[in-house]
Amino acid sequence: MSPTFLTSRIHRVVVHARGAVVTRVVTLPSPLPAESCELVATGITPFAEPASFRAVVKGSRQVVSVLARFVVPDGPAELGSAAERVQAAESMRIALREERTHVMGRRNQLAGIQFNLGMDRRFHQANARSRIADALAMTRLVQDELAVLDARIAELDRRIEQAERAVDAARVAEVQARSAEREGASRPTLSCHVRLGPGQTPLEALEIEYVVLAARFWPTYKAWLTKGATRVRIELDALVAQNSGEDWTGVEMSLSTADLVRDARLPELPSLRFGRAIPPQKRGYRAPPPGLDTMFEAYDAAMDKMQRPLPKVSIDALRSTEAAPPPPPRPSAAFAAPPTMQATAGAMPSPVSTVTLEEGAMEAIPAGLMPARAKGGGFFDKARSGGAPPPQSVKKAKKTMIAFGAPAPPSAAAPGGGGYGGPSTLNMPLLEQAPDTVEDIDASLSIEPDDAWLDFDSLMLPGAEKHRRGRLTRLPDDSVRVEASLAKACIDALPNPAWTKDPLTTRGHFDHRYDAVGRGDIPSNGRPHRVHVLAGEGSATPRFRTAPRESTDVFREALIENPLGAPLCAGPIDVFLDGGLVTNTEVAAVDRGGVFVVGLGVEDRIRIARNARVEESSAGLLGGSTHADHHITIDMTSSLGMPVNIEVLERIPVTDDKDVSIKVMSAEPAAEVYDQSDIGVPIRGGRRFRVDVAAGGKAKVAYSYRIKLPAKSEIVGGNRRE
């Protein structure tokens, strides 16, 4: 079954607070075969998560498997057009600087020339006039040459400055360019292999979904107030930044506050009842089945029969003056198989040819050709003798050799050798470089892996090496995955644009997806780009607030009900009134149908005047207490052409002293208690008056309160202070 290679385009992107889900639409061939087939979509960014690929089929065909594979193009890598422009500009700047250095050196050499008029008096009997004329002519020649060089240096300085500006402009253009212009067409890609089951019904559509982690967004808002701030239009925009390695051109955009990967299932609580044993909790990892090594007994037996004969080398070959081959490299991986002297049982024969000695050649080896001594003793200290015990370092090598499937050294009774010192011990120093023993490997294999082992696309079954075969191992991260992690880190490290809030931390206790009404373009350059999401119109209520005790200014505000039908995240909002920008402020998280307030600045057409009067008197049978009566009047004058409602915020004293009492005597109009909790700064003793002021009219607020305190006490600052 040969695969069918197809093209695809990005159709929809759902951007989360971190990461995005990209959906591609695959262009299907018109005569799709009815039998089982494999479709391959090429040109996918290598920064996509391989384990996140998912195929969505519209039709009756069944998806058998979905697999992502890394594709390296043929030929050398080519730079993109933006990178080529940067390289050309830098080359021009370097060439100009080198030319200026050369010209400057020549000028310095000419400027150091000195003339001595008396040098050749012994050789030429010319008069002084001719010598002076020659010196002046030579001086003019040098000065003319220096003038030419100075002009050239000035021209080079001007061109170097232009070249530096061109380099800066090219670098800025490269940063803002699309990924195809930066990386070129010969970059590595991913291909998605989708295998479909047989079916007679034609396939309607095929979509491929995958996850990229280098993406994020920030919400922003605009409020357009009209008709005296009684109508409002709220627009939700987003600043989207992505560095996924592919440009999102003309895609359907959605924003989601939900986590990209989150298990929403409720946890299964273990039962605490008495009785039957509770089965263990289900996990994604399963330990290797018992008796795993018995599955390879037939393979080991077959490999034993396929042993290749080892070449024999005479003493003359050992005495040859040819350079010995370099030693094999030290194993880098923790479980790499060490080199052995002969083919191991249960493993494929080693591709490296090994050397054995002929029978009787041991005694004929000269002393200069004897192998180096091991850390625990000599190799041939007890050769062909009663089989002395090996040193401890070789014991460890023997143990390690058994762990990796190599045969043990022959015993004293084995034919062809006597105990420690037989021919198979020639390679013992190499075995000392083996990583671990059998017990260490078994201990490491018994440890349950973490969540990284659940990335099944990065798992593989190794070859036929013992203690590795039949057990999954993880592939190391390649350079592409490192670049993807670096791109994600760069996106995560982006600072928040001015006034914006990160939805990952300010989204509140809700998750919502905002679907954009149109299509957008987001290049893959790691910079924020504004995208219009949606808009809605609703009613607004203008109101005026003042705190005369603090300031005589009257502040205009608009009470806006959320018209979008969706909750709002915290973020900046630009407020426009009748088409003109009034202010830039922030809005907190607002629920669906919630209300928020935006300020519109100071209203100069409403004037406030506050007056306070204090009367002090004695009270009680014997004058044992003092009354301090405070009378407050607030006059308001409006020059607006419409009636307005003004909120007047006041504050009366409060006390925790049981000997002091405070009582409101009168209030016109009636006041309500106001604790200022709506703006997050609660207070005590707050009062709020709501006053209606006619168009071009006046209004007044009057209230009084009494402070009763012992006659021997006094208010800090005086009883007559307000």
Image (tube, rainbow, N blue to C red):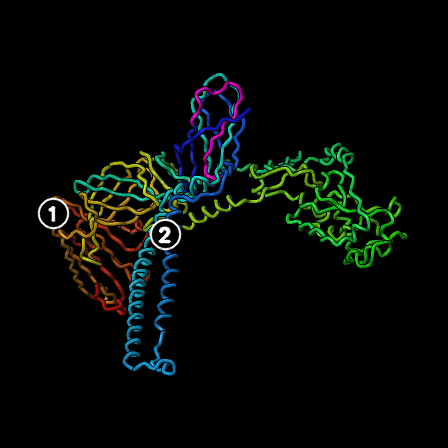
Q: How far from the left and from the top, in percent, is residue 361?
A: 85, 50
Q: Which residue type carries mark 2?
A: Ala
Residue bearing the label numbered 1: 640
Q: How many marks?
A: 2
Q: How far from the left and from the top, in percent, is residue 450?
A: 58, 43
Mark 2: give few (<14), some (14-19) or many (20+) Cα within 10 Å: many
Q: Secondary structure at mark 2?
A: helix
Q: Residue furthest front?
A: 125
Q: Which residue type carries mark 1?
A: Leu
Q: How far from the left and from the top, in percent, is residue 352?
A: 71, 44
Cα gap from disc 2 to disc 1, whole angstroms: 63 Å
Name the magenta segment's main secondary structure: loop
The residue range painted magenta reads 27-48
Q: Nearer the viewer, residue 678 or 319?
A: 319
- State yes or no: discs 2 and 1 in contact (Cβ < 8 Å): no
Mark 1: give few (<14), some (14-19) or many (20+) Cα within 10 Å: some
Q: Residue at x 39, y 33 (%)?
A: 12
> Left or right: where does residue 526 sit relative to residue 620?
right
Q: Nearer the viewer, residue 571 or 349?
A: 349
Q: How far from the left and from the top, in percent, is residue 408?
A: 80, 45
Residue bearing the label numbered 2: 89
Q: Earlier in the sequence, mark 2 or mark 1?
A: 2
Query: Which of labels 2 and 1 is toward the front?
Result: 2
